[in-house]
Amino acid sequence: MLCKKRFFDTKEDFRDPFSRDRDRVIHSSSFRRLEYKTQVFINHEGDYFRTRLTHSLEVAQIARTISRNLGLNEFLSEVIALSHDLGHTPFGHIGGDELDRLLKKDGYKNGFEHNFQSFRVLTKLEKRYKNFDGLNLTYATLEGVLKHSAPYKKKFFPKEIANNFALDYHPSLEAIVVDNADAIAYCSHDIDDGLKYGLISYKDLKDEPLIKRAKHFVNREGIKPKDKLFRYRLVASLIRVLVEDFIANSKEFASANSSKILCSHFKASQKLEIGHSKEIEKELNSLRKKLFKILYRHKKIVENMYAGKMCIRGLYNAYMDESNLLPLEYRELFKVRAKHRVIADYIASMTDRYALKSYKKIYP
């Protein structure tokens, strides 16, 4: 499968193509709004909590480290990481799930899928040029954002997109690195946030094999669970364990396929030898299950997420019932896009606090 051209030709400047992509993403409105979009915890309840913005920065840092050590293009990994959550709604995944349900209820069979929404942000919803929509990014960056999270489900995407981006093939190795860096980042920083605010304790996690591995490094530093530095060192050591294992288990495959890194050469049905070792993957899945049980289903988080879901539902129903509640620029888009698609794009673009503010204006 040959690499495709960029959508729009652009004159070369002093930056390489992926650094230019990164700069355009960082200067976009959608990237700045990530600062006030929920990762797991509602950000206005504590200044320490991660947001979509800090999460994206952490994913980019981990992805660059892994890519550098595997001989991959770290600038491509960086821009995919910085872009991968641009399409998320307010209130985390539950906001996207609710918007998906509402769209399907109204007959939009593809519903809402945040990877495709991130792609739409980069190619359609951001407006920075007179003659075309989008940020004019390279094909490799757009493919990485669209396909970084396997499996690549055709049902979410229009036929033209599915064909142009070869959903039957894996994306670049850099995109696969970003997908794994995403998992490493959210698992480690959710533990950090949960411990910081007392939603979980070290005792809840201490029997997990992966936590035991991380604590081994903390013990070598002479730090005890009661010490103030313990949480920091535990989370840093957890990231170290996961990153070192990923690099060691992927190096041979990445080295053998270094000439193919920017193209889709491998069928999606083919398991690639890039990722964690079987042992670490099993332990990581166990830790995720534990976090889902004791952290993500914590009463305080469930209450906030339910309130967020009701906010999304209320806004969508109000805008569908009375479109004059929408800004003029969005109402004008009804001429070229379906009404429910325009409304979904508007809601997805909101920050948590703007969504709540808009909700309270409609339902005082």
Image: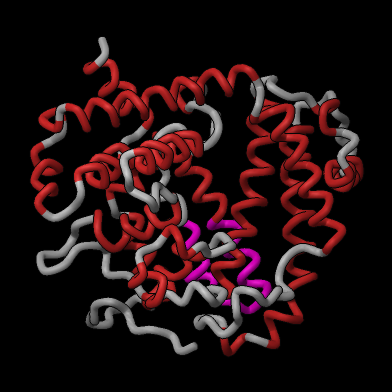
**Residue 253 rendering spot, x and y as whole percentages:** 72, 81
Prevailing SS of the magenta stretch: helix
Q: Is residue 22 left or right of residue 297?
A: left
Q: What is the span of residues highlighted in magenta in the rendered image?
A: 60-82
* 339 to 78, vertically: above or below: above
The question of residue 69 being in magenta is answered with yes
User: Who's the residue at 33% across and 48% down the image?
Assistant: 108
Residue 4 position in % (x across, y down): 38, 84
Q: Which percent across, then down, holds residue 201? A: 78, 24
Horizontal and vertical percent for residue 339? 20, 43
What residue is drawn where x is 8% and y is 38%?
A: 328
- The answer to if 134 sits in the magenta stretch is no
Taking depth in this image into account, of 336 and 244 the one nearest to the observer is: 336
Between residues 107 and 211, which one lies in front from this camera angle?
107
Q: Give the position of the C terminus as an image quadrant.
A: top left
Answer left or right for 119 relative to 210: left
Q: Is residue 38 visible?
A: no
Residue at (30, 42) in percent of width and height? 344
294 displayed left or right of 193:
right
